Image (cartoon, rainbow, N blue to C red):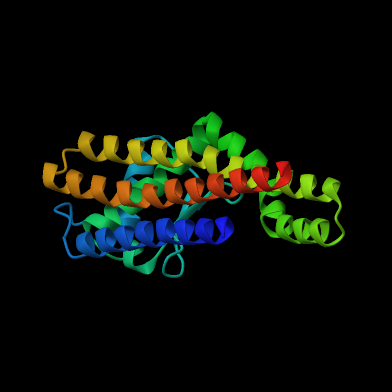
Amino acid sequence: MAYWMLIIVTLAIGMAASGYVNSQLKKYQQVRSSSGLTGREAAERMLAANGVTGVLVKCGNEGQDHFDPRTNSITLSPSVYNNSTVTAYATACHEVGHACQFAQGYTPLRIRSAIWPVANFASNAWIVVLLIGILLVMNSLIDVAIIMYACVVLFQLVTLPVEFNASSRALKYMQGIGLPQSEVAGSTSVLRACALTYVAAALASLLQLVYLLGMRNN
């Protein structure tokens, strides 16, 4: 019963966060940026303003907005890359924030990058190890599964300051170049909503970890 309650709560958290972020993204996709710059142009200007060179800004598939430190490149959705809206501007500048972190050796980003290979493997394998441990009644395997899942949770927690800082850099830049306050406020709403999805994921994972620890102790 407790596990089903956990599932319901985590699903509710995820759905609420997803619904909110989608509403904010759609709202400000309808608001044109007074700068007239597309997401690509905004990204390139922010990179130049921060003295960051060698970063490729390219167009990917819809929903693929991210910075990849392995290739030192920023991928933007077509709706961000080609359009001049508040959502596009905010999203592009947020990804540039990550590029600036990478160029400047931002410590939480370096920690996250170091954890990522382990967390990526553990995110897919921990449940298999847990089920085997339960079926074979092997507490040692259950402990390994919990440790693996704890690595996933740690990765999500480290992600939070990385995302918050990237948004802070984006907003500071937009304020510095004199964008209208209404657009900065809209960008703040967009980035805050996006950050909420990371907070929701971390919270749901923490609840799951607490449940696993309680199960193991019992």
Along the line of sight, which residue is nearer the eye, 81 or 191?
191
Left or right: residue 188 compared with residue 53: left
Q: Residue at x 20, y 62 (%)?
A: 27
Up the image or down, 147 lies above or below 23; here it is above
**Total number of numbered discs in the rendering:** 0
**Residue at 45%, 70% in the rendered image:** 61
Q: Is residue 115 visible?
A: yes
Residue at horizontal 28 percent and vertical 39 percent from the top:
171
Q: Position of residue 110 (x, y in %)?
A: 59, 35
For residue 18, above or below residue 214: below
- The N terminus - image quarter: bottom right
Residue 5 percent across, percent down from the top left: 50, 58
Judge by depth and name the residue closer to the eye, 140 or 107: 140
- Quadrant in which the C terminus appears: top right
In this view, 142 is above or below 178 = below
In the drawing, does residue 113 fall left or right of residue 203?
right
| Residue 32 pos. (x, y %) | 16, 60
111 and 105: which is toward the camera:
111
Across and down, in percent, residue 23 comes to 26, 63
The reply to whether residue 44 is visible in this rendering is no
